Image (cartoon, grey):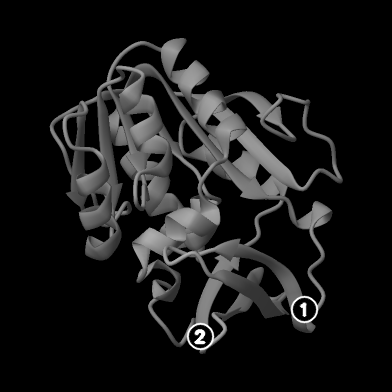
């Protein structure tokens, strides 16, 4: 389906955090949700633990699962002394004896599951590991609120790296409508070098998503357009789903 392992974006965890960290409104959303559903919490596809660690700092017992050993090594360094355990595993096949009060994915990680089979495997893992009445939450980009046209290199922004340098970020995109998969190439200009990485993400519309969730045994309680809990509307850029087993 793709010509790479979809992990090229996750080889430099320190600079990853500097580029993508600081989403305080998102951290607060998941923290409030966890507090309203007391018990141990599992984050699947947790990466460097950007969100996991915020919840652990608030005293919530956490487990974080990710497929990348590089990202998890950095997560463990940051989480020393906190009530969190990090496990290297594929979210589609993860197995634990624990049952969690809440399971979530963030960073649009749901979109990394590129086929029907992948999505079903992920949700089967979630269903199996949730306590009866437990909550699952995640966000995904809404195809009807996203520009899906093919684009040549376009500027996307910048960030300051671990050495204090400004890194300019740009990229290209190509959308495979038949598979609902966007192929992005990210280009980072570090001043003395340019690096590229590839990532592919699947876009699932609200109708297909809701049908999938229902078939996998979940009851959809809320869908939001943003972290402020604005009710979802058709042209929103995100679908944030909160469901119960």
User: Horizontal placement of 163 versus 60: left or right?
Assistant: right
Front residue of 7/167: it is: 167
Q: Residue at x 17, y 28 (%)?
A: 98
User: Horizontal placement of 5 versus 218: left or right?
Assistant: left
Instruction: Where is residue 137? Give x, y as percent.
Output: 51, 32
**Residue 60 is drawn in which quadrant?**
top left
**Residue 64 is drawn in which quadrant?**
top left
* Quadrant placement of the C terminus: top left
Earlier residue among tags 1 and 2: 1
Looking at the image, do the residues carrying marks 1 and 2 touch, with CB atoms under 8 Å apart? no
Q: Which residue is drawn at 41% across and 76% down?
A: 8
Instruction: Where is residue 108? Give x, y as percent.
Output: 55, 51
- On the question of residue 89 being in view, the answer is no
Give the SS element for disc 1: strand
Residue wearing tag 1 = 154
Instruction: Where is residue 102? Give x, y as percent.
Output: 38, 24
Q: What is the spatial separation of the Cα atoms under label 1 and label 2, in whole angstroms?
A: 15 Å
Q: Give the residue at the far front of this rendering.
A: 164
Q: Which mark is residue 213?
A: none
Front residue of 118/107: it is: 107
User: Horizontal placement of 94 versus 37: left or right?
Assistant: left
**Residue 210 is drawn in which quadrant?**
top right
When the figure is inspected, residue 190 is found, relative to residue 144, above or below; the finding is below
User: Horizontal placement of 152 versus 194: left or right?
Assistant: right
Q: Which mark is residue 195?
A: 2
Instruction: Where is residue 51? Give x, y as percent.
Output: 43, 37
When the figure is inspected, residue 214 is found, relative to residue 157, above or below; the finding is above
């Amino acid at each position: 389906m793709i010509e790479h392992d979809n992990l090229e974006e996750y080889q430099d965890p320190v600079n990853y955090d500097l580029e993508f960290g600081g989403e305080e409104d998102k951290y607060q959303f998941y923290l409030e949700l966890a507090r309203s559903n007391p018990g141990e919490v599992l984050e699947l596809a947790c990466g460097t633990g950007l969100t996991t660690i915020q919840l652990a700092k608030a005293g919530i017992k956490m487990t974080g699962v990710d497929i990348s050993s590089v990202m998890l090594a950095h997560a463990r360094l940051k989480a020393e002394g906190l009530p969190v355990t990090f496990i290297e595993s594929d979210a589609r096949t993860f197995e634990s004896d624990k049952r969690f009060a809440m399971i979530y994915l963030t960073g649009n990680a749901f979109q990394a599951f590129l086929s029907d089979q992948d999505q079903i495997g992920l949700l089967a893992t979630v269903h199996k590991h949730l306590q009866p009445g437990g909550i699952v939450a995640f966000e995904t980009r809404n195809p009807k609120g996203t520009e899906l046209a093919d684009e040549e290199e376009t500027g996307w922004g910048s960030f300051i790296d671990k050495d204090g340098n400004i890194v300019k970020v740009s990229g290209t995109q190509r959308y495979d409508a038949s598979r609902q998969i966007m192929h992005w190439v990210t280009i980072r200009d570090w001043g003395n070098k340019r690096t590229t990485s590839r990532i592919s993400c699947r876009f699932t519309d609200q109708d297909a998503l809701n049908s999938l969730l229902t078939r996998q045994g979940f009851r959809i309680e809320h869908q939001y357009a943003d972290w402020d809990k604005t009710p979802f509307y058709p042209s929103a850029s995100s679908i944030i789903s909160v469901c119960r087993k």
